Each structure stands twice: as C-alpha cells, then as structure tokens.
Image (cartoon, grey):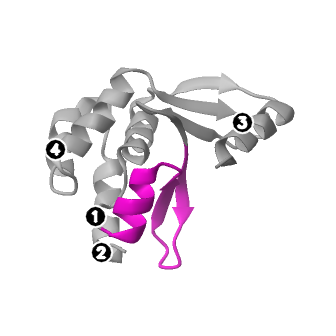
Amino acid sequence: MPSPELMALLEQVLDGFTPDTIDDSIEKLRFFFPETLLLAALDLIDRDSVIMYKTSWGRPQYEVLGSTATYAVFPGLLSPGGYKLAYCTCPAYAYSVLLSETQIMCKHVLATLLAQRLSRCIERPVSADELASILERQCKV
C-alpha cells in the first residue's frame, strides 16, 4: 500500500490535470508511473474506451474497454487514511496493485481518472434495470 503522503501528492497532480496543463501534468505523472502504463492509459482515452454510465440519481458507474475484456473501475473510494483510492476488476490490478504492490494503480484506473479530468469519458445514460444488468455482467467471474 502506498504511503498517504505519496497518494496525497498524486492526488494534487491529478487535480491539476486539465487540457491546458496536459504536457506539464504528464511530466509529473512520469514520477508515479512507468512510461508504458502512462502511455497505455492515454491510449485508452484516445480510443474512447472509458465509458461513464450516468444514472438518474447521479451516481456514475465506469467501465473501461480493455484489449481483451471490459473492466469495471471504481474511482474515488476513500481509504481508512482519508485519501482517495480506486479499484479495477482487471487481473493487472489484482496482481500489481494488491498482491505484489509494484504499482499504485492499473492503466484502466489511470485512464478513468484522466478521462474524467479531460471530459473524455463516453457518457451513456442508464436506467436502474440497465445498471443492474451492467453490474451483474461486471461481477461475473
């Protein structure tokens, strides 16, 4: 688990990520992520692979179309330490973030966080029944 100080610093960098500051912000993100992960996340955004399902009650649900599957991403979860965490259903998150702790997040989470700030999420309105079907599909093992 990364230190709260490191996560707070990353949160500051992400909060400053806008279309106007993209070059400077990418340079700062290189401190936190390997080049391959950063480029993979940006590629997902370029391919319009980050989907935000909008509910009538205002709770968004995120999905990222990966190269081999579609993954559910849960950004903005609060840690016991008070900083923001995220979760992804991909195998890379389970191994690199949770088990070996070699990464802070996977490319799907990073793509979702950056797409939010760049207004590059593909927005799709959903009903409660459609959202239930999406969640059921995402949770199948």
Separation of disc 2 and disc 3 at Cα? 35 Å
Residue with the mark numbered 3 = 134
Task: Give the magenta-colored segment's residue range.
Answer: 72-101
In the rendered image, which quarter contains the N terminus?
bottom left
Residue with the mark numbered 1 = 9
Pointers 2 and 4 in contact (C-beta within 8 Å): no
Separation of disc 4 and disc 1 at Cα? 19 Å
Seen from the viewer's position, the closer of residues 118 and 91 is 91
Number of residues whose C-alpha sits closer than 10 Å to that of mark 1, classed few (under 14), some (14–19) or many (20 or more): few
Q: Amino acid at mark 3?
A: Ile
Q: Quadrant of residue 117?
A: top left
Separation of disc 2 and disc 4 at Cα? 22 Å
SS label for mark 2: helix
Which mark is in front, 2 or 4? 4
Q: Outermost residue, top direction? A: 47
Mark nearer the N terminus (3 vs 1):
1
